[in-house]
Image (spheres, rainbow, N blue to C red):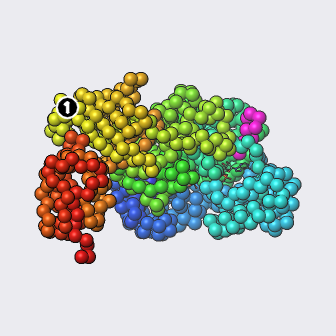
Amino acid sequence: MFRKILIANRGEIACRVMATAARLGLRTVAVYSEADAGSKHVAMADEAVLIGGAAVADSYLRGDRIIQAALATGAEAIHPGYGFLSENPDFVEAVEAAGLVFIGPPASAIRAMGLKDAAKALMVKAGVPVVPGYHGADQSADLLAEEAAKIGYPVLIKARAGGGGKGMRLVEKPSDFAAMLAGAQREGQASFGDPAVLVEKYITKPRHIEIQVFGDAHGNVVHLFERDCSLQRRHQKVIEEAPAPDMPPQMRDAMGKAAVEAARAVGYRGAGTVEFIVDGSDGLRADGFWFMEMNTRLQVEHPVSEAITGLDFVELQLRVAAGEALPFAQQDLTINGHAFEARVYAEDVPKGFLPATGTLEHLAFPPGSEFARGAIRIDSGVRPGDRISPWYDPMIAKVIVHGPTRATALRMLEEALAGCHVAGSVTNLAFLGALSRHEGFAAGDVDTGLIARDLEGLVAARPASPVEGAAAALAALGLLEPRDPNDPWCALQGWRHWEAARHFVTLTEGDQRHDVTVTILGPGRYRIEGLAEPQELSAERTGKTCIAVQTDTGCAQLDLVRLGQRITVFNAGVSHGFEGIDPLQEAAEADTGGDSVLAPMPGLVTLVSAVKGQNVSKGDALMVLEAMKMEHTLTAPRDGIVAEVLAAAGDQVSDGTVLLALEPENA
Ligand code: ADP
Ligand code: ADP
Ligand code: MG
């Protein structure tokens, strides 16, 4: 076994590889870009080497610098993770030429599977069923159209060098073919530098079922069963599971054998995935699957297979790369239970799943294991306070659950997702939660079109409930702070103990704005006005983030995080972000640079310190207004000279009254 390895990646997969390396007593070297200097994968490694600028072309794709870093630190092998250089045969050759071990398949196997057309031709030879279609060298538009007609519509045009769902076009009828072909060629050229395409029969109710394979240097190849990755949005996986729902044992057997044949045909070694498309229109049949492509690396969704087999695939990768034989044979492997994985991303779902950025001011996961098997497993490359930058994949975490049955595991997934609390960036958590409750998904009736068909219902945002709004208002007013005797908020509550004190706060959620009045009725009892109907409720903090709210009709347990005046309420898998605005501060800000000071709310002027002709600086106290039983200091909106004092102590003033005027700025 190696003593030291370098991980040529970042984010969750770099951390995941390091977790296993550490468990096995291997030392680890991280590489990082300038944008990643403070990131989790750097902190987890024993050593870290800066390899360049934030852009991936300047860092994570710089094979030369990565190899240099390995040599300089004395690492013996390089783990590529997924993405980046993981499927680049030139990199593999360069690693080997430098006298290092590439933890992955031989360059020849990657090359053989690198182009979809050549891979398919190879699979036909190896006796693996492929999707009926054309994958020849002649790329003339007329010939491709003829082939499409022979295959029969609908057809799918794919860039042969494509990946990640790019360069694909579904063509419903012959008259659309020419335009769609041009589109796929353009995208193939732009994204992969290769305009060549293949044309396939489009499977109408397709399921994506893939087989995990492993090979070693001693000629052993096994499969570790299937994963169903049919829940996709625009050909990108969203939730994956293992095993596939309703998989007949004969079909599992046939697919496993085909995948092993595929791997053998290219002399495969290490972890790989053979992706098949399956016709799900009429149940699963042992002859109803076709080879799509082989991914010659560890897959994002590998943890679901680890869960059901009880194996650590990174450990196996390391052992195989170090020359050990696989420690089991096919007949030793069995499936235990059912697992799901959901990919949690920083993305703006209502805005069409736009990647988002932000600082993860609050980040909490449900209790579980990290990068290791368990009922709930969280694989994440970020920590609280880390930034999701625009440079890389906006993944926050993979949430993996493992239960005895599919139904149990799905409920666990829903629960685990509801236990993921993120503030500081929008996420797809509510969308994933909605998917975990989708009836068709629960019934195992999955196909790659499910999300698109039901998109509207899956992305519908639930508005904040009055109870959630009330909790936010109480938090904004500091009324839910922990009862720490040294905490000044506690003193404030004590001070208010005997009177029905009223507080006022403006609460915004997106472009919604509520002027909320909170009346303290007794310890922990409040009357809330300004959100829907007036409500009376009890609220108290029961944990670090946990708030119990009792109304006439029931009790709700919410989680709530307050960062300054930004409040995030988490409830049943949905989060709502509020901002509490102090009306005085808002008035002061609105007035910044203005010439006058207005009463922000009705109240009693109790003290006037400003005098006519006085030179004041921005922020200087001018007078005190008592409103809502609290004293508010009104301050100068800018530097200037007091032109007029229009209120005196004892005046009862109404909202918007001009209390003081400054000399005009350019006078
Ligand atoms: P596929 O859908 O082909 O099985 P995956 O779902 O495993 O692939 O990942 C989607 C694509 O994006 C893959 O090509 C993978 O290598 C790449 N990818 C995913 N996440 C990252 C990441 N964090 N960094 C780099 N590449 C990534
Ligand atoms: P990529 O390299 O982008 O991952 P794939 O060939 O693996 O490309 O296809 C990605 C996805 O596109 C599949 O998971 C499936 O949802 C869909 N797809 C691919 N081929 C077909 C087909 N012949 N019929 C229907 N859907 C397909
Ligand atoms: Mg694919």
Q: Quadrant of residue 442?
A: top right
Residue 436, image x, y percentages: 55, 36
> Is any atom of residue 575 visible in this view?
yes
| Image side of residue 207 versus residue 339, left or right | right
Q: Is residue 589 above or below residue 211?
A: below
Between 25 and 313, which is closer to the camera in this rendering? Answer: 313
Asked whether residue 641 is drawn in magenta, I would say: no
Residue 295, image x, y percentages: 62, 52
In the picture as drawn, the residue positioned furthest to the top comes out as 553
**Residue behind mark 1:** 499
Residue 439, image x, y percentages: 62, 32
Q: Is residue 98 above or below residue 310?
A: below
Give the extent of the magenta segment: 277-284
Between 421 and 396, which is closer to the camera in this rendering? Answer: 421
Between 532 and 349, which is closer to the camera in this rendering? Answer: 532
Magenta part, dominant SS: loop
Residue plotted at (67% across, 31% down): 246
Q: Is residue 466 above or below residue 87?
A: above
| Image side of residue 356 versus residue 259, left or right | left
In the picture as drawn, the residue positioned furthest to the bottom comes out as 667
| Image side of residue 244 versus residue 560, left or right | right
In the structure shown, which secondary structural element does the residue marked by tag 1 occupy?
Answer: loop
Q: Quadrant of residue 254?
A: top right
Residue plotted at (64% across, 55% down): 165
Q: Is residue 244 above or below residue 554?
A: below
**Placement of the C terminus among the 4 image quadrants:** bottom left
| Image side of residue 35 versus residue 266, left or right | left
Residue plotted at (14% across, 65% down): 612
Between 95 and 336, which is closer to the camera in this rendering? Answer: 336
> Is any atom of residue 112 visible in this view?
no
What amino acid is labelled 1 in the image? Glu
